[in-house]
Image: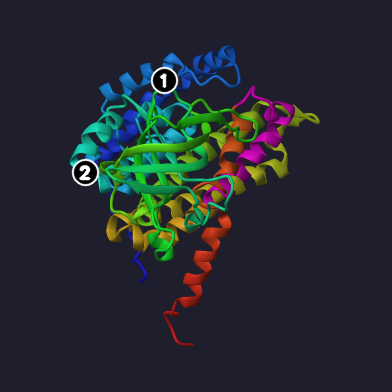
Amino acid sequence: MDIYPAFPAPSDRAVELHARLSEFLQTHVFPAEAAYHSFRAERGHDDHTVPPVVEELKVKARERGLWNLFLPSESGLTQLEYATLAELTGWSNELAPEALNCQAPDTGNMELLHLFGTDEQKERWLRPLLDGEIRSGFAMTEPAVASSDATNIESSIVRDGDEWVLNGRKWFTSGASDPRCRVLIFMGKTDPEAARHRQQSMVIVPIDTPGVRVERSVTVFGHQHQPGHAVTVFEDVRVPVTNLLGEEGGGFACAQARLGPGRIHHVMRALGAGERALAMMVARAKERVAFGKPLAEQGALRERIAESRIELQQARGLCHQAAYVIDAHGNKEARHLVAAAKVAVPRIVTGVIDRAIQVHGGMGVTDDTPLADMWGWHRAMRIFDGPDEVHLASLARAELDREPPFRL
């Protein structure tokens, strides 16, 4: 079905929140970045202690009503309205999303618990996550198989009386190295003989359950993120059968429900990183002199700045259309637009960041600016939540099946 691409005007509340969040970033978040990075540098590369400024920012954000904006049932915002706010948080990706309790993987896990959790599961796990009291991890990806195809997952979930017994080795369990992490959502196979998309289930696992081991945290392009991207091992882990999330055999459907909003939220935030990189490129071009004149007067650099603006506007249009279709017609109808945005936006943003790095010269490849880390994270976006190739394949299938609007 082709969607008529007319976006509704934002609510007065969304406009007011945008102004409030902009002020919060300028007054509190950006000034806190130095303290955040200084604390992490003092503690060392592999330390996952939470810098105190993170919890300080959470208190200030909540006082301002900038809290749980990602979840429509909590915020009252549409996805399109949230897109403009998520973009602002992308300007400071390590601090701003968490300050607003809008950080991955917790947002996706909260969505899962909101959609599929029992009342007891919501009370025990969703409420403290919504309150920002704990953090969580999502244990799906496995190092031994191509996890871009979730049906490849080999970890096992076997019923033994009133308990599930879990075995498997996961990695990129983001958040599991954070000392505040209290719960993991584990995906494995409950019935290897069932239909391909009905073999998997999801189970809630408290991280302190015997047999759960956080082995190490892997880096992303040499950068160790504070919450960590953990290798987690599950050896004969036993949890009650009531810890099943959703229905038995519904794990693949749950994963799709979780990843849809997660993908578009990542894309929204990426736009903010692209805007920050462009702003840095422009500032550098104005202040730096080479070959007798400011870089801003060099024709080639002017073209790079102009191309960056055009590309970011194109990326934003695609992201906002996907968000609008989610609002108007649901995740399923928007899936191809979300896939297109998941491919296009990280490509564009890494290109803009790369140009900014080039303009900064040697400084651009160091940690004296945020550009190197920004590039690494957004390059990784082309792999996590489904690599480009998976999204391109689904888009190609849809296009091949599409009937043209006119018979020529």
Side of 127 relative to 320 (left or right) = left
Side of 274 relative to 336 (left or right) = right
Looking at this rendering, what residue extends furthest in the front direction? 161
Q: Position of residue 269 (x, y in %)?
A: 45, 40
- 164 up-or-down from 221: above or below: below
Q: Which residue is mark 2?
A: 118
Q: Which residue is mark 1?
A: 54
Q: Secondary structure at mark 2?
A: loop
Residue 314 in view in this figure: no
Q: Nearer the viewer, mark 2 or mark 1?
A: 2
The quarter of the image holding the N terminus is bottom left
- 33 up-or-down from 206: above or below: above
Residue kind at label 1, given as amino acid type: Val
Q: Position of residue 165 (x, y in %)?
A: 38, 42
- 325 up-or-down from 127: above or below: below
Residue kind at label 2, given as amino acid type: Thr
Side of 286 relative to 102 (left or right) = right
Q: Secondary structure at mark 1?
A: helix
Q: Is residue 353 magenta?
A: yes
Q: Position of residue 200 (x, y in %)?
A: 40, 54
Dot 2 crowding, Cα within 10 Å, few <14, some 14–19, many 20+? some
Dot 1 crowding, Cα within 10 Å, few <14, some 14–19, many 20+? some
Magenta range is 344-369
Residue drawn 30% across the image and 37% down it: 69
Residue drawn 60% across the image and 35% down it: 220
Query: Toward which corner of the image does residue 252 lie, by quadrant?
Result: bottom left
Looking at this rendering, what residue extends furthest in the left direction? 119
- 76 up-or-down from 23: above or below: below
Measured in 3D between alpha carbons, the distance from the residue under mark 2 to the one under mark 1, in whole angstroms, is: 31 Å
Looking at this rendering, what residue extends furthest in the top direction? 42
Q: Position of residue 378 (x, y in %)?
A: 56, 41
Q: Is residue 166 magenta?
A: no
